[in-house]
Amino acid sequence: MQIGLVKGSLWATRKAEHLSGLKFLIVEIKDPITKITSSVVAADIIGAGLDDNVLITTGSAARVALENPEIPIDATIIGIIDSVELNKS
Amino acid sequence: MQIGLVKGSLWATRKAEHLSGLKFLIVEIKDPITKITSSVVAADIIGAGLDDNVLITTGSAARVALENPEIPIDATIIGIIDSVELNKS
Amino acid sequence: MQIGLVKGSLWATRKAEHLSGLKFLIVEIKDPITKITSSVVAADIIGAGLDDNVLITTGSAARVALENPEIPIDATIIGIIDSVELNKS
Amino acid sequence: MQIGLVKGSLWATRKAEHLSGLKFLIVEIKDPITKITSSVVAADIIGAGLDDNVLITTGSAARVALENPEIPIDATIIGIIDSVELNKS
Amino acid sequence: MQIGLVKGSLWATRKAEHLSGLKFLIVEIKDPITKITSSVVAADIIGAGLDDNVLITTGSAARVALENPEIPIDATIIGIIDSVELNKS
């Protein structure tokens, strides 16, 4: 999984049928060790909001998180992170 | 998922049987935060056109979007983006 | 999917049982927008040849293209490209 | 699979239902040949701890490792590495 | 698939149950066109050895190669390469 920071939202009226009602958030993926960043659009099932640190799952696991194999997504927010403990050595 | 901009089209007469009738668009994937770009060929089921901002799903989700597990594609346009709201801080 | 150029072939006598009879081509993946290249070994089911521009599918879709879920491949040529139209703006 | 070094832990109270009881470790993936590093959050089923060298599997294999296809994870620690032998030539 | 060179081995006593008896080799993936390298740990079912040039499959195909969907691996050696023919133009 990846650690990300919610940075925004995305709306699309014309979309695949099974996506209706889903919330799409733009998440900045920040590697806690290399600090390299990228971003992804993820479906949110936890109720995450702007500036929340979140846990993202990708690939077929994203559909498993929604418990509906017919929803054509490849990234889902599966947790809001309380804390991270990292050994700096 | 990824955010992309439709930049062109692709045609292939000699192709796998289950691809007949599918429209293939060339999409520039533009990371809204890092601005890094790459491109992908995606099947279109929404009716997207040149210069449309689109939402792309990849991997096995691409076949799920077409509701036909026998179509051998790995990227599909699943939405035409109305708007994106991004927190610049 | 990705756009590639067939650059060569590969032979392996000692290989997984279900691969017998398959043709393996070495394809240079060329991103039509960023021009970044990489290469992949892909199974060919279309009859592509040296210097053909081809369409490649990867992941589980590669097995779907062969219509045999037991063939352990992760990249397949699914089309020979006739033409590409790209908006340069 | 990838070779990684356990560098820390992550906690999330608000999370997808099926994740309850799972331990999440932050693993630095270190390519033994190119030395390029990245990091991933992986579920641990082996009892790995800080500074353990571990073997990570990703994608749908991560769920297979937990023997429960409903757990929406995409990376799992599947072994604690005893030793690596690498030909430096 | 990818072309790789077997560079070493890896042992892990404490590991996921279904991995018992599997041989893990460290393979340097060398892109024959861009020469970019990375490495991966792959299960071996062909009997490959040090300095063998091998063909690697990844993702869910890696489990298909072992003909056992319960083995949680994401990379498998599926062939020992006899020869590669590459058009240098």
Image: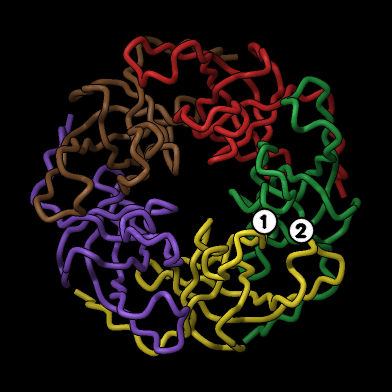
Chain colours: A red, B brown, C purple, D green, E yellow
**Residue drawn at x 83%, y 51% as measured from the top left:** D45
The residue wearing badge 2 is D78
Q: Position of residue E3 (x, y in %)?
A: 45, 74
Q: Amino acid at mark 1?
A: Thr
The correct choice, above or below, for A42 with respect to A14 in the image is below
Residue B21 is left or right of residue B54, and the answer is: left
- CB of mark 2 within 8 Å of CB of mark 1? yes
Mark 1 burial class by Cα count in 10 Å: few <14, some 14-19, many 20+: many
Q: Residue at x 22, y 67 (%)?
A: C6
In this rendering, position of residue D56 left or right of residue B12: right
Measured as percent of width and height from the top left, residue A75 is found at 54, 32
**Label 1 secondary element:** strand
Q: Position of residue D37 (x, y in %)?
A: 66, 54
Chain under callout 1: D
Compare residues A42 and E29 and report the one nearer the observer: A42
Parent chain of label 2? D
Disc 2 residue type? Answer: Ile
Q: D31 or E47, which lies in front?
A: E47
> What is the tally of numbered marks visible in this picture?
2
- Using the rendered view, name the quadrant where residue E50 is placed: bottom right
Q: Residue at x 20, y 57 (%)?
A: C54
Q: Secondary structure at mark 2?
A: strand
From the top left corner, tell me how far across and down residue B47 is, in percent. 21, 22
Where the N terminus of chain D falls, by quadrant? bottom right
Kindly identify which residue carries mark 1.
Answer: D57
Asked if residue B22 lies left or right of residue C75, the reply is left
Of D25 and A37, the residue lying toward us: D25
> Picture quarter containing residue D85?
bottom right
First reached walking from the N terminus: tag 2 or tag 1? 1
